[in-house]
Amino acid sequence: MLKALDSKQQFKFVFGIFLFFTVIELINLFTGRFLNQFGNIPRYVPGLTGIVVGPFLHGGIQHFLSNIVPLCIFSYLVMQYGIKRYALVTVWLIGMTGILVWLFARPATHIGISGLVYGYFGYLVLAGFLSGKFKLIVISLLVGFFYGGLIFGVLPSRPFVSWESHLFGFICGLVAAKLWATPSKV
């Protein structure tokens, strides 16, 4: 059974996430982006592995940096619902976003953790209000205020940006909020 994490443990956990993604980014960088072939390739059976692997890969340092900061911030904020809820929401978002991208996105190699970032964004914006808890409502308001511009990322804008991952992540985040807005005890 998962035990509740205090704030210090949550920061350590988020730092662990940062290190994990950084190590993968460095390996991918020093292998000439070799790992990117394992991204999510829609409707291509070998591309199914990308549902799970693709979120951990990035197209370059700028891509990595634009994802890692909001990932760490949002991870910490989602942990305010409990570590069990954090794990549940994270697995849901990676799995469902990846499946939807594989089924419906344009043919391309979709990589990057932005689908999870957008999923956390959708979850955080809605879940606080649904929970009815003051602290979580404040988190929803702050995330909406400081990161509200993310919503424009769900629209097609640039050819090498997986707006589909953003869109499906955001929708899956809203669904997760509807399903699991009440904080868990652990």
Image (tube, helix red, strand yellow):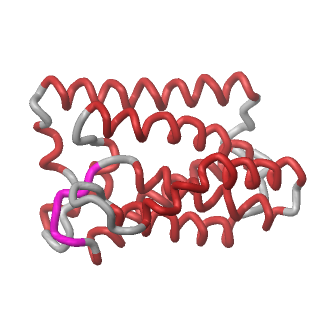
Which residue is pictured at 27% across the width and 72% down the height? Answer: 105
**Residue 88 location, quadrant:** bottom right
Q: Main secondary structure of the magenta part?
A: loop
Which residue is pictured at 42% across the width and 24% down the height? Answer: 19
The quadrant in which the C terminus is found is top right
Given residues 41 and 45, the one toward you in this image is 41
Question: Does 107 lie within the magenta span?
Answer: yes
Picture layout, residue 100 above or below residue 109: below
**On the rendered structure, is 121 left or right of 98?**
right
Q: From this viewpoint, is residue 49 visible?
A: no
Where residue 5 sits: x, y (%)? 72, 32
Which residue is pictured at 50% across the width and 34% down the height? Answer: 69
Where residue 95 sits: x, y (%)? 41, 62
**On the rendered structure, is 147 left or right of 99?**
right
Question: Does 101 lie within the magenta span?
Answer: no
Picture layout, residue 16 above or below residue 177: above
Given residues 3 and 38, the one toward you in this image is 38
The quadrant in which the N terminus is found is top right
**Residue 8 location, quadrant:** top right
Picture layout, residue 115 above or below residue 9: below
Where residue 28 sits: x, y (%)? 19, 31
Q: Which residues are magenta?
A: 106-111
Which residue is pictured at 18% across the width and 57% down the height? Answer: 109
